[in-house]
Amino acid sequence: MASLQTGIFALGTSSHVYLELDLVAAAQPTEAVARVAALREPRTTIGGVNLVSGFRPELWAVASPDAAPPGVVGFNEPLIGPTGYVLPATQHDIVIWLTGSGYDAVFDLSRGVVTELADVATPANEMVGWSYHHDRDLTGFIDGTENPPLMEAMRVALIPPGLPGEGGSILLLQQWEHDAVEWEQLRVATQERVIGRRKADSAELDPLPPASHVARTDQERLGKIFRRNIAYGTLTRHGTIFVGFSRDQGTLRAMLASMLGADGGPPDKLLAVTRPLTGSYYVIPSADRLAAFDGEIGPDA
């Protein structure tokens, strides 16, 4: 059985950095993957920092065609809902997710990562996240209520044994900026109808408003995912980094379509007070498949 990148499930860390990078013109996919693979042990344990790495699906398919989940593609075109609401496509080639208990160690390792990859990839986007009151997002609501327990989360997030890409995952990574002024002017009861949960204890509303965020992202209807969302930003510009892992890209796509109302249902009311700034899909290979590239620079497939 393929071994997983354990950082996906390393819960409880408070400091996060997402580095999205693009290949330089002369870099080859296999060379880039090998360089990323070399970032792993022992650096991942220095200062208690976890490192998870992934690749644009098309890049990974070139570098490791036998381990590429079929039909998975990058976020290459914006998604436009029936009302004209746009989910932007900002696909990059590589993602490095660093997370630990303190930002100093995460920052130092981030600098090291960028330096070591400098001749094959350049930074294109950096997102710094931090936990907010343990498990809440910046709307004030508890985030991740529907996350499954850890063992079930592995079944939900990881490609099963025997399938191409086994032990890996598909990541949807988005940065959502909240309209804090408009949100905070809403009464708590109105906020609860937008989210579909009570603010104090995250209990689901009954009856559930059909256009609420909970209703439009219902995992019983759309399929299960495992989320590692985190807050980001400043006083004037802040929001949520959405971090969704799934064994099946179709589940993630269905969730976005439902939020937009592209499935025939109402658009998600949360879209009125938050907007996406970025959108990328990445294949997160299994740890052993990635380790097979370490130190090996071979011809592209």
Image (cartoon, rainbow, N blue to C red):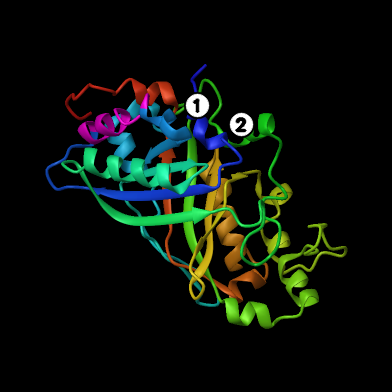
Q: Which mark is residue 4?
A: 1
Foreground pick, 135 / 87: 135
Instruction: Check disc 1: other Cα within 10 Å, few if <14, some if 14-19, many if 20+.
Output: many
Name the residue nearer the viewer: 58 or 231: 231
The stretch drawn in magenta includes residue 217: no
Tell me the residue at 53%/54% (across/down).
130
Mark 2 vs 1: CB contact within 8 A: yes
Left or right of 157 on screen, residue 49: left
Q: Residue furthest right?
A: 206
The residue pinned by badge 2 equals 154
Decide: is 46 above or below 139: above
Q: Kindly identify the amino acid type of the residue bearing the numbered disc 2.
A: Met
- Marks 2 and 1, how far apart in space? 9 Å
Could you tell me which quadrant the C terminus lies in?
A: top left
The foreground one among 46 and 35 is 46
The amino acid type, in three-letter code, at marker 1 is Leu
Q: In this view, does 16 lie above or below 238?
A: above
Considering only vertical position in the picture, is 257 above or below 19?
below
Is residue 267 something one can see in this rendering? no
Q: Callout 2: helix, strand or loop?
A: helix
Q: Is residue 84 left or right of residue 24?
A: right
For this view, does 234 lie left or right of residue 255?
left
User: Could you tell me which secondary element the residue under label 1 belongs to?
Assistant: loop
Disc on res. 46:
none
Name which residue lies at 83% across and 57% down: 203
Q: Earlier in the sequence, mark 2 or mark 1?
A: 1
Find residue 145 and report its horizontal and vertical position in percent: 72, 50
**Residue 176 in view of the camera:** yes
Give, as a single range, the part of the protein colored magenta: 30-42
